[in-house]
Image (spheres, helix red, strand yellow):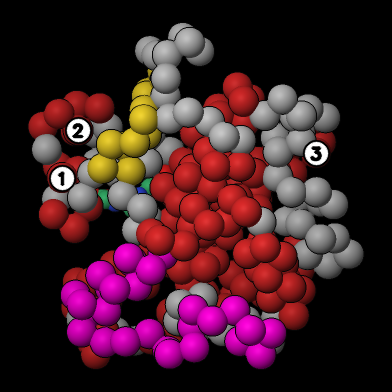
Amino acid sequence: MSEAKPILYYDDRSPPVRSCLILIKLLAIDVELRFVDLFKGDQFEKDFIALNPQHSVPVLVHGDLVLTDSHAILIHLAEKFDAAGTLWPRQHDARMLVLNRLLFECSFLFRRDSDFMSEIARKGFANVDVSYHERKLTEAYGIMEQYLEGQDYMAGEQLTLADISIVTTLSTVHLMFRLTRYPRLERWFAAMQQLDAYAANCRGLEKLRQTMERIGDFQFPPTSNSQTPAD
Ligand SMILES: N[C@@H](CCC(=O)N[C@@H](CS)C(=O)NCC(=O)O)C(=O)O
């Protein structure tokens, strides 16, 4: 199985996809990329639905294994390709903490980000209750601020899959809502942006910004992509 080259079905406007792309770059994994244009409905094509009935990206095909969730993909790739074993720690408690953060990303942060972005796409920005979503998303900011108390990364003192999973969604939310009131989170985000592999997030994030502005008929706040300390 592991001899086969992994295939990643992707649309890099998707935060979960971008987390996979960051990990792939970080570990220099040789992956074949196949684009699925979510905004053209490619995810509903018969062949893709056969692969992933949930009609979502990312999907990773690695030999006989088909994974249809970014968190499972991150874990799989780390187990196969992270020789150092730090991104998905070998020690049980440390690994469970990373898993807990991955589930936070999946069930809380991404859910809320996705609710916001989907509503903009569905109704147009002018018809969205932005302060409702701001409350929901800044609650998530507050939780992450707490996670970072006394530690530099989301699940301890070293970079793990938790950071890689969270940073792409955080960067998406950050297109709209500033981090000024969350100093630890702001510092962590700035540090994540210094990683070479973070470059794998940038193109898709910018594409998402442009797509959302076009279909939602609005503009994100102008400074949102500049990562100055005052941002
Ligand atoms: N929990 C999943 C979420 C995947 C997901 O919702 N992907 C979105 C893009 S961000 C998608 O493909 N949506 C298309 C659709 O649902 O039709 C993961 O982490 O992979």
- Label 3, on which residue? 94
Residue type pointed to by label 2 = Phe
Residue 220 marker: none
| Mark 2 and mark 1 residues within 8 Å of each other at the beta carbon | yes
Q: Of callouts 2 and 3, which one flags the residue occurring earlier in the amino acid sequence?
A: 2
* Distance between mark 2 and mark 3 Cα atoms: 36 Å
* Distance between mark 3 and mark 1 Cα atoms: 38 Å
In primary-sequence order, the first of circles 3 and 1 is 1
Tell me the tag on residue 48: 2
- Which residue is disc 1 drawn over? 42
Q: Is residue 215 above or below residue 36?
A: below
Q: Secondary structure at mark 3?
A: helix
Between disc 3 and disc 1, the foreground one is: 1
Find residue 152 and report its horizontal and vertical position in percent.
Answer: 81, 60
68 in relation to 164, above or below: above
Q: Secondary structure at mark 1?
A: helix
Residue 223 is covered by the magenta coloring: yes
Regarding residue 48, the answer to whether it shows in the image is yes
On the image, the x and y values in percent for residue 53 come to 24, 33
* Residue 107 visible in the displayed image: no
Report the residue at 49% width, 88% height from top: 223
Q: Position of residue 99 (x, y in %)?
A: 65, 41
Q: Nearer the viewer, residue 188 or 28?
A: 28
Q: Quick one: label 1, few (<14), some, or many (20+) residues within 10 Å? A: some
Q: Is residue 20 left or right of residue 213?
A: right
Residue type at the position of mark 1: Asp
- Quadrant placement of the C terminus: bottom right
For the record, the magenta segment spans 205-231
Query: Residue at image x 67%, y 29%?
Result: 82
Residue at image location 20% in from the left, 84% down from the top: 217
Residue drawn at x 32%, y 87% is: 219
Q: Amino acid at mark 3?
A: Ala
